[in-house]
Image (cartoon, rainbow, N blue to C red):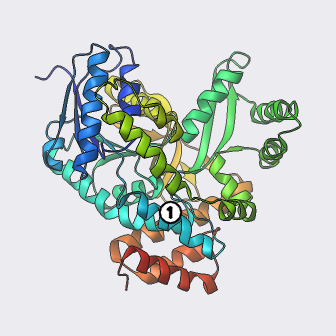
Amino acid sequence: MKSGLTVAIIGAGSSYTPELIEGFLDLPPEQLPVRAFRLFDTNADRLAIMTGLSERMIRQRGRDLDVASGSTLEAALEGVDYVITQIRVDGMPARYLDESIPLKYSLLGQETTGPGGMFKALRTIPAMLEIARAVERVAPGAFILNYTNPSGLVTEAVTRHTGARFLGLCSGIPSMIVDLKKQFGAGYPDFHCYCVGLNHLGFIHRIVSQGREVTVEILQRLLEQKRQKPEDAEGIAWQELCLEIGALPISYLNYYYHRAHMVRKLQAQDRTRAQQIMEIEKDVFAEAAAPGTTRKPEAVNKRGGGGYSAITFAVMTAIHKDTGEDLAVSVPNRGAVDGLRPEEVVEVVCRVGRQGAAPIPVGPIPPAFRGLIQAVKAYEVLTVEAAITKSRRLLKQALLNHPLVGDADVIDPLLDEMLAAHGMAFR
């Protein structure tokens, strides 16, 4: 009988891998008895660099852990307990197309929502289904903890079309909850936050202290904090909006609530985010490849995604120790949220234990943002089915539903250009 856990990282050539390894090494050794990491990536050069760095980081901390890179996906999955997925199909050049082409049509260019998020999903869903089915064959008891974007769409596809034990993770809402607890937990005993929505479209809509609803109080205090800095006009306006809708949205809601401003801002930049990250990753991999590097490269901090490892290992610990901890995770709704189907994936606070994540009942979505969530969910469901069936008609229906698009005169030429740019054939 093995003495510890084995964790596979699929997409281990990612610049996020050092953050995962560092996050694990920062845990008390008794919290999570990981004995081995199995790393896999289709890019052999990047995989070799990250495997070498991971080994050096572990040695530098004096930990007794086995690190190996698999030559095949199946080899990397053999005997694992957890699978962390963080793949990027076609890399940053494809992300550049996703970001730049929509801007030509005065639409948001972004990798997790709108037309850019759609095309990332179309590339990614087939690969993630292949990975999930391989896990079902080789390690059927393993949990897949997914970070591959667009995470909500990927989770929707995998939970609908496979039987894999699959949880969609994101650091966004969990980090917001941690920050709120740090700020207000001392003054509000038994402090709990609850969220409703979709990945990158989430709202902390209920904050409770000793069973008492304190959401409005907390939102007012956050606004008062912002008003102490009158030079931060955007921050003040954001907190005023939060108070008006009665919830604290993830920052991605800027794309919806300030859409024209965000499009103009992106159009005015001399480089897309993909181009910026390509430059950052040159520094990350140069530092990671250096034999003397024994810690997370400094350039990783410019990459974004803070809190990435924290939610990963919080979920893993809750499952392994069967703690029943409350954590924000993307899972099938199963009746937790009124107005969405049981199989449709939502991001809500779940009770996490040995059997996975059970969504805590939410009830009705507040009317202030109910329509927005339902419209984006319709887009997600249609996009998943388009990815499976290769139906252009479903692509058009999806974009007609999306609040950031919804213009039939623009959708056809946009689809023509993006499908041609990515070399995709949809009927």
Residue 73 located left or right of residue 334: left
Residue 101: percent from the left, percent from the top?
54, 72
- As helix, strand or loop, the secondary structure at mark 1 comes to helix
- Pick the quarter of the image with the C terminus: bottom left
- Looking at this view, is 286 or 30 the one in front? 286
Q: Is residue 291 above or below residue 159?
A: above
* Residue in view at x 54 percent, y 85 percent: 412
- Pick the quarter of the image with the N terminus: top left
Residue 332: percent from the left, percent from the top?
44, 52
* Residue in view at x 80 percent, y 48 percent: 241
- Looking at this view, is 266 or 139 the one in front? 266
Binning the other alpha carbons within 10 Å of mark 1 as few (below 14), some (14 to 19) or many (20 upward) gives many
* Residue in view at x 56 percent, y 74 percent: 399
Q: Residue furthest left?
A: 1
Q: Is residue 126 visible?
A: yes
User: What amino acid does circle 1 point to?
Assistant: Gly
Residue 392 located left or right of residue 363: left
Quadrant in the rendering for residue 391: bottom left
Q: Please name the residue that numbered disc 1 is placed on.
A: 117
- Looking at this view, is 85 or 48 the one in front? 48
Q: Is residue 401 above or below residue 184?
A: below
- Looking at this view, is 184 or 271 the one in front? 271
Residue 335: percent from the left, percent from the top?
50, 51
Query: How many numbered marks appear?
Result: 1
Residue 223: percent from the left, percent from the top?
83, 36
* Residue in view at x 72 percent, y 20 percent: 188
Q: Is residue 168 visible?
A: no
